[in-house]
Amino acid sequence: MPVSDLLQRFEAVRRRTVRLVEPLSAEDACVQSMPDASPAKWHLAHTTWFFETFLLEHEPPFDADFRVLFNSYYQQVGDRHPRAQRGLLTRPSLARVLDYRAAVDERMQALLTHDLPPPLAERVALGLQHEQQHQELLLTDIKHLLSRHPLWPAYEAPNAAPESASETELDWLPVPRGVYEIGHAGDGFAFDNERPRHAVFLPGSEIASRPVNNREFLQFVEAGGYAQPQWWLAEGWDWRCAQQLEHPWYWRCTAEGWQEFTLYGALPLLRSRPVSHLSYYEADAYARWADARLPTEAEWEHAWTDAMARLPPREAWHPRAATDDGVGQVWEWTQSAYAPYPGFKVADGAIGEYNGKFMVNQYVLRGSSCLTPPGHARATYRNFFPASARWQMTGLRLAR
Amino acid sequence: MPVSDLLQRFEAVRRRTVRLVEPLSAEDACVQSMPDASPAKWHLAHTTWFFETFLLEHEPPFDADFRVLFNSYYQQVGDRHPRAQRGLLTRPSLARVLDYRAAVDERMQALLTHDLPPPLAERVALGLQHEQQHQELLLTDIKHLLSRHPLWPAYEAPNAAPESASETELDWLPVPRGVYEIGHAGDGFAFDNERPRHAVFLPGSEIASRPVNNREFLQFVEAGGYAQPQWWLAEGWDWRCAQQLEHPWYWRCTAEGWQEFTLYGALPLLRSRPVSHLSYYEADAYARWADARLPTEAEWEHAWTDAMARLPPREAWHPRAATDDGVGQVWEWTQSAYAPYPGFKVADGAIGEYNGKFMVNQYVLRGSSCLTPPGHARATYRNFFPASARWQMTGLRLAR
Amino acid sequence: MPVSDLLQRFEAVRRRTVRLVEPLSAEDACVQSMPDASPAKWHLAHTTWFFETFLLEHEPPFDADFRVLFNSYYQQVGDRHPRAQRGLLTRPSLARVLDYRAAVDERMQALLTHDLPPPLAERVALGLQHEQQHQELLLTDIKHLLSRHPLWPAYEAPNAAPESASETELDWLPVPRGVYEIGHAGDGFAFDNERPRHAVFLPGSEIASRPVNNREFLQFVEAGGYAQPQWWLAEGWDWRCAQQLEHPWYWRCTAEGWQEFTLYGALPLLRSRPVSHLSYYEADAYARWADARLPTEAEWEHAWTDAMARLPPREAWHPRAATDDGVGQVWEWTQSAYAPYPGFKVADGAIGEYNGKFMVNQYVLRGSSCLTPPGHARATYRNFFPASARWQMTGLRLAR
Amino acid sequence: MPVSDLLQRFEAVRRRTVRLVEPLSAEDACVQSMPDASPAKWHLAHTTWFFETFLLEHEPPFDADFRVLFNSYYQQVGDRHPRAQRGLLTRPSLARVLDYRAAVDERMQALLTHDLPPPLAERVALGLQHEQQHQELLLTDIKHLLSRHPLWPAYEAPNAAPESASETELDWLPVPRGVYEIGHAGDGFAFDNERPRHAVFLPGSEIASRPVNNREFLQFVEAGGYAQPQWWLAEGWDWRCAQQLEHPWYWRCTAEGWQEFTLYGALPLLRSRPVSHLSYYEADAYARWADARLPTEAEWEHAWTDAMARLPPREAWHPRAATDDGVGQVWEWTQSAYAPYPGFKVADGAIGEYNGKFMVNQYVLRGSSCLTPPGHARATYRNFFPASARWQMTGLRLAR
């Protein structure tokens, strides 16, 4: 990437993060609604910490305390403030964190006016991809926080929500038997976990042309699917029973019908929208009830590589009702546990902690969601969450 | 109380609460650091809710949602937002809560320009006492929040802390055997739990002329008192072991010696200051180690009625090193469980939930602390907390 | 007590414990159904450990490991096997524990053929009182274990249950105002917590002639008392809500009407029997609903001293439907927190851990129950349990 | 299988289960030491329940209550006694459970004298495989129970432990790149999760000739491996820190050197024995420290199919120090998450709950252990446990 492009891209990504926080008060940006979610202010600071730590390590720090306060999980960088206590950081204030961003941006911009050696340029690119990941987390974390408020306040005015549309019919696309390659190769950016490109054997199957939508999932709910153990993994059933769940997270049944909580506040449950905020357990149970299964990540990647390359750069805070693309509105659970590809190597140093150490008890999600920053997605992208996670924009696509 | 006095008093108390919040950012005022503590913003709103609910119930509400959001524990008023989730209320903002205060103040001021029937005037007086109680809680809750920040930030600048002073000698004052009366009688304000005045039999004992100070308590710590079960109640010992405690809450041992966390930030542990932030378990263990015991609340009240009447109206955020008064710097644990006085009656309606329903598994504290609003204390005052509570300004005085 | 009497009493008490275990299999005697309850085998061994530790400390131990395995809570004796893990002790077997009892009995019998110095004789007497306390616990612990079995098996055949009887009318007995003495004085055995006898001031009240019975308590249940927060202490209400309680422990509503679990298995809820297995919270809520209150322990002792002296030596595993005595069928919660009497002194050494270290967050129960060994009860006896305890034979008597 | 063979096999398997319980008292056989472990008595009864439920469903039950008491997890059979409460079942007694076994055996023997239709014969075979699985669990569960006893009692006398031997050298065996088939095909018994046989692509690698032994693992321990986060999966590190682990489960460091708890009681840690009782986290951390990785289950199966076919039918309660076989002493963690093979189908009815519903958040173990019943193992066998499980006989083999 030419120097000027990298600088331009740096500025665009950094600006977008600040823009995402604009609708929030200092209070909204400070509170942590559960251990898995981080305050918006923390996302603002941590993404800045990443550049300061990995690109500006030879300059005096903006504030030496921030090295600990805003380290997420890099053991090799040193101490970390405990994740579950990020919401206790009322200091620094939101204003001071924005100053921190501005100061680091200034230094980074100075750095980026020069030709960087490739390893450093790659590290900047990684920092920007990292920040884009946090952009999506920032939105899902704010959504969770607002959902815990008894009044279900909106992040953006409801009239900004994407419009309704008619339902797309579901087709089954063939995924032929044979040896194929998956994973990232070549020059463009990819995370370490997408590499190396390698051969897999696919058994021959079919995959749905679009994700499961709310109408379909509501049938499962109304047919009593949440009360019938035969559809559920044993661990999923225990999880459901412990919490007495009867429908997806963010749904509620009111006198006016089903609603879902969105970043636009409560909206009627539009039946043609992809179902979202499912756990792996719910996605798997639905698939079994529908006499199908979740795809493997290899099947998914083989089938959707082309469509992902054509994904339009849209931005919205809730999935559209239907898309011609068939992909890109919700992350899709696969049946594949998150594991290293054959020959996977972690990078040296603290950067090596980026992905590899999470490869246990998580499941791979493919595609991208309406909350994913435009341009961030790739066909080889491997998102991952524990089976019980429901606060991400997570849906499913059937295979058989 | 003449009308003009009540209005003047109303304005003074209400102003003081707002003043206490001035050093705080919106973020400081929003976060909840543990289920027992409430955000400062919540204290601002709830004390206002009290007047709106119990004095202005016939006027249209400032915001109908606030009826639920800021109800603390009055079952008869209706639903309540769960106590442990007060920190999730990023909305309304601090600014809007201050508007709420102003609007209710205006209505109350209008009400208070008229002669109120005695029951209503008493209710206003109760509302002000209630607000004063929350003023102290607001400070202890903020102290807890700041203490959970890794940098131990200050609420007020350290140079404002009360100065050092030499240690006061300890005398033993006689409490003679006989039948005495304790509890509140007469016209002045008192909470229902201080009534009725009633006879008690005192066995004859001695009570210390001042609370235990840091030097004395440090002896217990350095003698290994936290590792010797013989001084501890069994439940206290289990509590200590579960948390691996070795000294009081807010103390820490540094290379420069012992420090304590205060609202002025970290201060050196001044040995002549009354020890504070003790649980009942620690107070009781110390007393046993010192070959003494905690006083009963009847002994305490009998001995300190006069001194409490002479208490000067001082304000500070940490106890003074020594006082001529011998009282009024820290709340003092008594060995008395919090129980109804003979003939205790709760008021009718929701106000009746004020005190009586907490009379189990709590212990009475007597006196007042440096955080208690000037003029709020009384000799008959019965403060109460569970035996494990340590975030209040709680010390002890010996008896034998 | 003459030597021969002490020996005879020793043999009688020790035999009774073994007899209580006879209906149990080795499995019944081994399992621990909750951390608060101990296995019957453990009771057999621990009561023996008491004699071995405190009377035979100069003789070689039966088994050196037992010193740790069967120490309950005596820190000064040394290590203890954790209370919550008593059920893991499948070894020693029940048979070997019975051998342990026989061996210690033999040595104790040899000791008791000689004139013991008074301190040792007192210690033997304490050991026997201790064993009697464990006899009652053994029964309540077994009852809890059997109640957790889905089939509600019986400890003894149902036809052995005490017969039905008609309901006794309730009178109100006066407790006049004045200074009285309570507590134990004189030569007979009493625990340290019953001493010293001391003056108290009673305010003048009335106390019910008999405990609350099942019919009365069922009215509270059927009137919705478990769903109405106004009767409950705040902590009691939280406790009730957390467990979704709707009636007393061991009650169940079947197609054939209300039943209660007893040591005779499931029995119809006989309405004239004293209600039992209440927590303090439930007892207190009922009293408030009935426009009354719990008595203080001083009121109770003043009123029932004579009746306790006349208590017939009956034995049964469930309360009789009505008694002429008005007392002695169920323990009765008082509103008095368990606290030291003025001038209370603990004994020197490990024996001093017997009672004093439990004097926090417990409430005093007075009287005795049908499970209390005949001859064990006294008017000055102070039983105590936490407010949430429900597995003891605990009922209530009203005062006003 | 001819009728007479099935009968003979039935009798042998059933007898072995009873023999395994012979060293245990009724108390040992009743207690449950953690929710994951079941009492030996429950294993005896549940394996019998399996035959009664799935083969004798048309005959009157031995005891109708047992249908619920001894159902493990078959939702479609009906209610189940909660797993974590199996230890509360003091009734039926061990003796009665042995009667239950005898009665069901008698009926089964009658059934097995006739030619069974193939589906029924397969169900009998499944019941025997099921019972063999429980034989191993019975031993690991008893081992856990005895390990929780402070005296570390033995299941069998220490002198019966397998002898020491010198260490086997480690070779690296090639696993060539290419498409291979794994999974069960053909007529012999296999569980549903081993089917269907299907193609996989192997990337080309090397696999160790024997499992990691105690000497090697001790190097990791003594090099501080349990205190160095860089070797650990993030979740594994949190798990280690929460429990403050410093070495494998069942190891302890004494004045006489390292020991491990075994079914023969405490034994010196013999360095040439395979390391066992590791969690997935520990196995994975060791592999990373050793600059290697865990094999996939496909690599494992490809490499060890022949050796598994030649496994001698040995029985012992602790791994041998070294074996010529290179396999069969400890289960070996693979990096493969437990997932359905392509085309996996569950059986109809309750039997279909056998394996499929556990396919989430578990990892596959391959091989067999010294506790696996002789003849039960197969190269295609897929054992599975959660990543944190340590009470099974679980070790590891390296790949690279």
Image: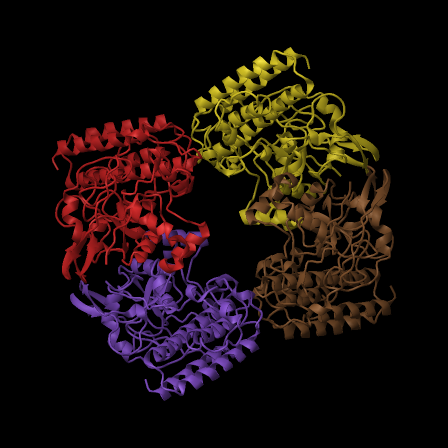
Chain colours: A yellow, B red, C purple, D brown
The x, y position of residue C130, in whole percent, is 39, 74
Foreground residue among C184 and C81? C81
Examine the rendered structure and indicate whether residue C48 appears above or below residue C228. Answer: below
Query: Which residue is at a point 44% across and 86% down the rendered structure image?
Result: C110
Taking the image as drawn, is residue A158 in sight?
yes
In this image, A18 relative to C351: left or right?
right
The x, y position of residue D324, in whole percent, is 84, 56
Examine the rendered structure and indicate whether residue D384 appears above or below residue D107. Answer: above
Quadrant of residue B237 in the image? bottom left
Examine the rendered structure and indicate whether residue B328 appears above or below residue D278. Answer: above
The x, y position of residue A200, in whole percent, is 80, 35
Query: Which residue is at a point 64% across and 44% down the rendered structure image?
Result: D225
Query: Which residue is at a point 28% across and 29% down the rendered structure image?
Result: B19
Quadrant of residue C30 in the image? bottom right
Foreground residue among A397 and A349? A349
The x, y position of residue C205, in whole percent, is 20, 64
